[in-house]
Amino acid sequence: MADQQEEEDLRLALRMSMQNSPPEPKRSKPEEAANSTTMMTPEDSRRLQRELMAAAAEKRLLTAAKSVPAFASPLKSDSDGDSVKREIEIEAKEVNVGNELSEEEAYQLFFMVFGSGVSKDILAQWSNQGIRFSPDPETSMILVQHEGGPCGVLAAIQAFVLKHLLFFPDELVKAAQSMPQNLSSSRLSKNQHVASNSLAAFTENAKTRALVISMCEILFLCGNNKRAVIATLSSIGDGLEGSEDSLKDVIIAQALEGLSIESASDLHKILRVDTCTTPASAFKRLEAMIPIFQSRMGALLFLISALLSRGLDCVQADRDDPSLPLVTAPFGHASQEIVNLLLCGQAVPNVFDGRMDLGGGMFLKGVSANAEVGFLTLLESLNFCKVGQNLKRPKWPIWVVGSESHYTVLFALDTAVQDENELEEKESQIRKAFDAQDQSGGGGFISVEGFHQVLRETNIRLPSGKLDSLCSSGFIVWSEFWQVILDLDKSLGGLKDSTGQMGRKVFDLYHFNGIAKSDLNCSQSSSGGETPIQRPRFTKLRVSVPPRWTPEEFMADVAVPSGSAGTEPSGKDAEVAKPEPSQHAPLVDCIRTRWPRAVCNWLGDPPSIV
């Protein structure tokens, strides 16, 4: 009976708060609530949530009465009461609030993500990783990772956050109501770039807004630009909206106390699902719920949100083998399907372009469209896969980087690193045509019939002797074909260049690794002495792409002018210098899958992708 009375009281409070002249609800002062956290009883907790929900409803009403949000349709009623009513109706249509997952959906979701034999350690990893920026000033743009496993989720979000911080900083100061309906953005001109000294200059508010916008963009990408499903905790409800920060901390701490996910039934009990049909409504909901995503459940809740936005049946249809869990055993890493879902909106398992027809009605699914931010992987340098142009050359110069066990982020501040000169465009054209005929899964060889199709599409005219030699074995290997193209005159469609200067590039790349490590060079004092600071890792790399197609020729005897990306000094006053010897780390192998022959240098410790 007590619980029923509390529900009636709550409904009454909400009804009163929706009246045109709402009475002032009785609620605890923030200071009092914060100071009484340790003494709060279950009854106090329930009363606090009732008061907060009533206050939040009152605040939304007052805001709607004062102004019409820019994303809503104009209201033409002369009556303020009618305007408020219509505004509430619009918001109700945009947000389907407070649904619970059915038991069937919860079961399907749990086993899709974790499978049937998941360990408690993996569940703990995914239940203890928030989406939070590093508190260290020098790495404050990096989402910090404390647990293994969810790095794929964090890296994908990090890539979109960088996109908005670096290339759309002006958007971060606009009101939430001005959220664009189409969140994916066109490319800036190549002359627009961000100065390197701005990396540590963003305010906490700008970073939080970039995070919310990025989460909103990813969810709508998963929802085919029609919807975003936001998964939060049912025990919190609407209590966070309109609350002071100190009260939000109290509410979240109480909701998370003793909470664990060990089965599908646990998901069914704790999840609350809101469906938003416009970016503006999703932004408002995510902005209100961002403390939950910053809590220890944040990474898992966002993954669930992305899966539900896509639709569980659609996710399974995207996959080549839907019987396998999305979180891989035995270490609980995010699969390529999770990363592709967050980067491209589809949970496909491969990184090549389009799909590969295996015959007999069977095919493998790859990435179908050019991505906003891209993907590079160490596995390509080891010839285990081939990343297609949709991920390798994204709209913005930002890439999630995959190793055997971890995901990090690589990016440039200047969009010119993506630009190509005439010969690079020709190389890309030839490679794309070759890859389209490659049915080996990235093995780098095609049939004779496919080879003739490549020659027709690229207008390459091989001498008969060269053609017969390449086709003699019954299949054509990319490396052999490429060497012939390098020795073939440009007039015949080849890339032979008598000058030897084929567009040298020099540019900077930056690498983020979100795993917090001890920095022995930076310590803080404590009662027991000095303790190394835990911080993510950040590395600036100087990248030089030599002008000749073979690095051996370049390193042996060619002196090259220094310059910026895409530029070449000329004349006798141009500075001429031998390149610095290349430093090596596994990240360099990844970079060379995007820029072959790249020479990389950095100061300090080598960049780590593990």
Image (cartoon, grey):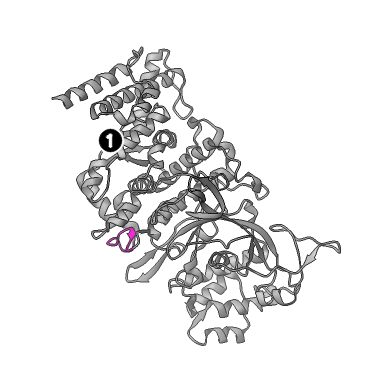
Q: Does 575 sit above or below residue 249?
A: below
Magenta span includes 609: no
Tell me if I can see residue 590 in this picture.
Answer: yes
Between residues 269 and 341, which one lies in front from this camera angle? 269
Tag 1: residue type?
Ser
Between residues 291 and 23, which one lies in front from this camera angle? 291
Majority secondary structure in the magenta region: loop
- Which residue is pictured at 43% across the width and 55% down the height? 151
Between residues 198 and 400, which one lies in front from this camera angle? 198
- Which residue is pictured at 67% across the width and 62% down the height? 421
Please state the horizontal and vertical placement of residue 176, each as a whole percent of the image.
48, 32
Is 206 placed left or right of 581 in the picture? left
Please state the horizontal and vertical placement of residue 240, each as a whole percent of the image.
37, 31
Q: Does 604 sit above or below residue 42?
A: below
Which quadrant, please, contains the N terminus? top left
Tell me if I can see residue 513 in this picture.
Answer: no
- Which residue is pictured at 64% across the width and 46% down the height? 194
Q: Does 12 sit above or below residue 224?
A: above
Residue that sits furthest to the right in the current view? 572
Residue that sits furthest to the left in the current view? 1
- Which residue is pictured at 32% across the width and 16% down the height? 26
The stretch in magenta equals 320-330
> Which residue in the protein does label 1 denote?
235
Q: Does 163 sit above or below residue 548?
A: above
